[in-house]
């Protein structure tokens, strides 16, 4: 895939269908689960013993009806003919499909990049068809992730909704509040005093936030 549009897809409530039951299917299923997927269907005549227990397994050869209700499809069998059929049917239904084996005639819609998770911080790398290089770059970048970035990302999952819903905050103040959290001084405040001190520092800079509760008190309700 020479050119692609990168995105982060919410798969929590999306039915993800994997056609194939081997080692590649295991990796796809585990990656989806790590991303929060709760509804995974796998179709194959046989299944690898490491298939996660939450996966719905259908012991059968692929049929078009197996894609009913799917929001995302993965064609990962060892048969090019079956993968062709999966791609064609997914496209007919308007469903994004990933194909594990490369095929110029029936290519998939997307690839999965080399990925490393550090809590809410996710490092991904794509190199337009050179997975070994992508993995090398990912490992190099992953080793440079500061644990404080991960703590701030966790804190912002709590603070962001409060900033967005603050009644009296102007749009430009919301923007500036978010930008102020992505600074070395904010990282230091969080490290030294936790999320309460970080919130207090925000309120001092943006007084219109003062009507909102402390983030810790909110999470303890």
Image (cartoon, rainbow, N blue to C red):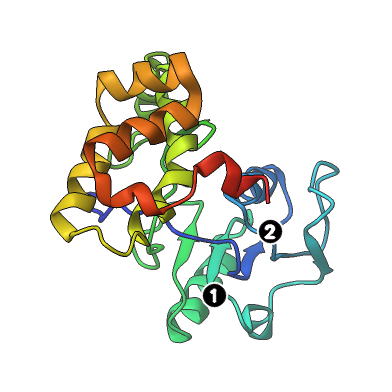
Please, what secondary structure does the residue beneath circle 2 have?
A: loop
Q: Quadrant of residue 85?
A: bottom right
The quarter of the picture where residue 62 lies is bottom right
Can you tell which quarter of the image residue 104 is in? bottom left
Please give the name of the residue rendered at 78% of the width and 58% of the height, measured from the top-left corner. Answer: 55
Note whether 49 is above or below 135 in the view shown: below
Mark number for residue 8? none
The location of residue 121, given as percent across then percent down, is 44, 34
Quick one: 5 or 187, which is closer to the camera? 187
User: Is residue 16 rendered to the left or right of residue 49?
Assistant: left
Q: What residue did someone put label 1 on?
A: 85
Residues packed near mark 1 inside 10 Å, few (<14), some (14 to 19) or many (20 plus): some
Residue 140 visible from this viewpoint: yes
Instruction: Say which label, 1 or 2, has the lower sequence index.
Output: 2
Residue visible at 70% across and 45% down? 26
Mark 1 or 2: in front is 2
Secondary structure under tag 1 reads helix
Q: Specify whether residue 8 is in view.
A: no
C-alpha distance separating marks 1 and 2: 13 Å
Is 12 above or below relative to 141?
below
Disc assigned to residue 20: 2
Residue 148, image x and y in percent?
Answer: 43, 19
- Give the x, y percent position of residue 10: 49, 60
Report the residue at 49% width, 36% height from top: 154
- Identify which residue is drawn at 44% across, 70% down: 96
């Amino acid at each position: 895939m020479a050119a692609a549009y990168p995105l982060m897809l919410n798969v929590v409530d999306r039915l993800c269908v994997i056609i194939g039951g081997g080692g590649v299917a295991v990796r796809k299923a585990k990656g989806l689960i790590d991303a929060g997927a709760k509804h995974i269907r796998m179709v194959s005549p046989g299944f690898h013993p490491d298939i996660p227990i939450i996966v719905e397994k259908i012991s059968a050869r692929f049929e078009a009806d197996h894609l009913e209700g799917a929001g995302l499809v993965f064609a990962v069998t060892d048969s090019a003919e079956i993968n062709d059929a999966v791609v064609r049917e997914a496209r007919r239904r308007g469903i994004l499909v990933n194909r594990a084996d490369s095929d110029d005639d029936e290519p998939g819609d997307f690839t999965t990049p080399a990925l490393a998770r550090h809590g809410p911080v996710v490092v991904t790398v794509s190199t337009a068809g050179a997975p070994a290089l992508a993995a090398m770059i990912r490992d190099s970048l992953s080793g440079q992730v500061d644990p404080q970035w991960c703590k701030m990302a966790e804190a912002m999952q709590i603070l962001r909704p409060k900033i967005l819903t603050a009644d009296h905050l102007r749009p430009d103040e919301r923007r500036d509040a978010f930008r102020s959290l992505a600074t070395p001084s904010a990282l230091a405040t969080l490290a030294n005093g936790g999320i309460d001190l970080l919130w207090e520092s925000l309120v001092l800079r943006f007084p219109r936030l003062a009507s909102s509760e402390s983030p810790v008190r909110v999470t303890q309700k």
